[in-house]
Image (cartoon, rainbow, N blue to C red):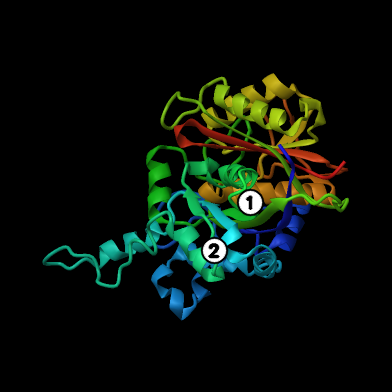
Amino acid sequence: MHPLLISAYTASSCLGRGLEPLREAMLAGRSTLKPCDFETVSLPTWIGEVEGIDDQRLPASLARFDCRNNRLAQLGLLQDGFADTVREAMSRYGADRIGVFLGTSTSGILETELAYRRRAPDTGALPAGFNYAGTHNTFSLADFVQHWFGLKGPAAVVSSACSSSAKVFASAARMIASGLIDAALVGGVDSLCLTTLYGFNSLELTSSQACRPFDRARDGISIGEGAAFAMVEPAPASIPRDAILLLGYGESNDAYHMSSPHPEGRGARQAMDAALARSGLAARDIDYINLHGTATPSNDAAEGNAVKGLFGDATPCSSTKGATGHTLGAAGGIEAVIAALAIRNGFIPAGVGTTDPEEGLDYVLTTRRQAVRHVLSNSFGFGGTNCSLILGSPA
């Protein structure tokens, strides 16, 4: 594929707002996961919460979109000058030539959960002010972002669980290659809610302590929330040496089980193979693998098998979910931003929380300062949906 320029990017998570706190936390190997104190939830688990989401006030004209997820989206858009970059792109390409492709898992479902508490006692009717389309519907996220900027190009939301906001990079690449758009705003937003916390707990997938990806004693995930955005556009003929490029993507499906990966990581291997083939790179060209690394016993085992089969034990790798929590539909976007930071700043982030990693991988326990040119970032979701991205710097 022709490389795409990632001309701007930003991410907000429990580590803080924007790139700088994320970069500092990655360099320091720091986590801000905490015991769950969200809303009325009473579970022995840990979460990654973004501070100040409910202090966000949406413009009056966009009040129909008011929910935790869209407030988090606005908080994310306001960081690192990202909104200014989008507006500059609008003046350059036109509002109808920029696509919006975003990932989420549950969108603003918290708004529905709160509305159910206020149902009419006699009829069971939901409150009159409840707006399903503007809040709970998964398309609400892209609809909100499009209206927030006044963009008029194609817009879509991918909701394929934890691969969602990695797959949108592939959607954007295809739309740009087809000539339907000139640029795309991509990323993902996912926020804490009762559905995911109780849901993952009922599946016995949450840990009672901060998660420990790829640790021999790992026992489950820590759910987080976050927002990540990037602008992608065709790379110019003359590319700055410090540019960040999307070099390849690969998608697959295990076709194995609704909530468990193929034990040998068959679909994960196919996604990584496809990303390498599309980028024209070989496994030996990858300097760092940002693992999906959820910290559940079966997911990490399957991914480990796939990575060992393709890369052996020679490529440094880690999961950054021990620092951010598993931000579900936003994870792919946040980890693409971490990949960009690793390339731009020359480091391989530590797998925070892990002390006794599984054998057979070069699993990084302490952040390394070294040149990084190519990063492969994995995002795998329920239903066996897999996506691998390759980001890199110019030759």
Three-letter code, disc 1: Ile
Q: Secondary structure at mark 2?
A: helix
Q: Residue at x 59, y 28 (%)?
A: 268
State the CA–CA distance, disc 2 to disc 1. 13 Å
Say if 200 sits above or below 9 in the image: above
Q: Residue at x 42, y 49 (%)?
A: 196
Three-letter code, disc 2: Ala
Q: Residue at x 40, y 37 (%)?
A: 203
Q: Give the class, few, some or many, for how many residues have Cα within 10 Å of label 2's Cα (few <14, many ≥20).
A: many
Relative image position of residue 100 (x, y in whole percent): 55, 56
Q: Is residue 67 left or right of residue 365?
A: left
> Residue 148 bears which disc, if any?
none
Q: Give the class, few, some or many, for how many residues have Cα within 10 Å of label 1's Cα (few <14, many ≥20).
A: many
Q: Is residue 342 left or right of residue 11?
A: right
Q: Is residue 210 left or right of residue 161?
A: right
Quadrant placement of the N terminus = top right
Relative image position of residue 248 (x, y in whole percent): 69, 37
Q: Is residue 296 left or right of residue 316?
A: left
> Residue 73 bears which disc, if any?
2
Relative image position of residue 51 (x, y in whole percent): 57, 67
> Residue 334 bears which disc, if any?
1
Relative image position of residue 264 (x, y in whole percent): 57, 20
